[in-house]
Amino acid sequence: MKSYKPKVLLLLIALFVAHFNYAQDSIPLSLSTAIDMALSKNIDITMADYQVNTLEYAMKEVNGSFLPKLFVNANYNRNINQPVIFLPEGFGMGGPTKLGSNNDYRAALNLAQPIYSHFNINNKKLMENRFSYQNEIRRETRQKVVNATKKSYFNYLIAQEIVKVQKTQLENAEQTLLDIEKRRRLGTLTDYDYTAAKAQFTQAKSSLLEAQSTIMPLANSLKLMLGLKMGDNLKLTKPVELLQNELVLEVNPTKVLTENSTLRQLELDIEVKENQITLAKSAFFPTLDAVGVYNYQAQADDFRLSEYQWVNTSYVGLQLQVSIFNGNITKNKIQQAKIAKYISEDQREYTTEALQMQHQELLSHLDFSKQKIEVQLENMELTEEALRLANKRYELVVFL
């Protein structure tokens, strides 16, 4: 007796430690917590954020086209054959006359400030629309991640509940098998009844194993959505009844279409296409820049740089550039942009019609699901009552 108590005590301590470690390693997870984790750690949202950040820098790059440009050029030329000019008769010896020296050094400081550029103006508008378009893609990504997280959460939650139900059914089947075995021994039931009950017990055991096999894939799917590791243990804290609160759908079709991210993206895409048309037409407009150049140069036949005579020259002015003919390149670009806009408009109309149909289908499916849930609840109540009456009958038979 003295050796038995320490063993029991050690067993209780081991069970307590195991339970404590499991509780410590498990991550309690409510639906709101799961959504917050997905929004902060999901890889799809991270990639969408990177795309938006990329366009932020692209907008800064476009804004830089309105700022002045300053750069330096420097070069050295060795004149193997010196340049010449041709003088008319009467000027010296006439004919070709050599100029310059063997060594030619030049450095120039160039400044250019855009004054008017139709391309720069419309390119900025195009980039702003692309930025809005990418922001809408990010919003859609967040919506999809939230919906996928809810789906994964509920699938895992329902799978756990199914396992519980299958365990209960297995226990009921086992109890029924034991009761029938007792009645068979009393002679009130045959071997056929016992075999049928045993088959039901085996089927319940198989159903439990099948339900348990879905737990790990669903848990891993949820972990992947939340950016968790495979070894993390999850403990869902919301009851399965929460699913009924999710059976809510916006009835107003106009509001659904207005807030739909896919349609919003198509609207922004049409605006982008319009900007691309305007941007292509910018080639027809002139550009005007203010320019300034400061030159620093010297020439000599030797390499005694300290004795060179360096000369400074500079000028400022305006530079106007007008495109007269470029091989119809601009005209063809405009036609391409127009066709792209037509495609986006057709996609918008098609998607609008498809979303309206899907909305009606979802409303019908939602009503069907609500009715199905009500029927299942009635069936559960009837099953529980039938089980209670069956157990009572078996108890009476065994007693008799």
Image (cartoon, rainbow, N blue to C red):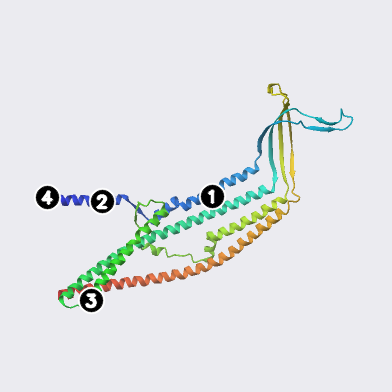
- Marks 2 and 4, how far apart in space? 23 Å
| Image quadrant assignment for residue 300 | top right
Q: 252 above or below 279?
A: below
Residue 206 pos. (x, y %): 30, 66
| Image quadrant assignment for residue 35 | bottom left
Specify whether 358 is left or right of 267. left
Q: Mark 2 — residue?
A: 18
Residue 47 pos. (x, y %): 49, 51
Query: Which one is closest to the eye, mark 2 or mark 1?
Result: 2
Q: Amino acid at mark 2?
A: Ala
Question: Which disc, if any, is residue 52?
Answer: 1
- Marks 2 and 1, how far apart in space? 47 Å
Specify whether 91 is left or right of 132. right
For disc 3, the neighbor class at 10 Å (few under 14, some 14 to 19, many from 20) is some
**Residues under numbered marks 2 and 3 in contact, where contact means CB atoms less than 8 Å apart:** no
Q: Mark 4 — residue?
A: 3
For disc 1, the neighbor class at 10 Å (few under 14, some 14 to 19, many from 20) is many
- Marks 1 and 3, how far apart in space? 69 Å
Along the line of sight, the residue nearer the viewer: 289 or 312: 312
Query: Which one is closest to the eye, mark 4 or mark 1?
Result: 4
Q: Quadrant of the C terminus?
A: bottom left
Question: Which disc, if any, is residue 269?
Answer: none
Q: Mark 3 or mark 2, which is nearer the start of the sequence?
A: 2
Q: Amino acid at mark 1?
A: Val
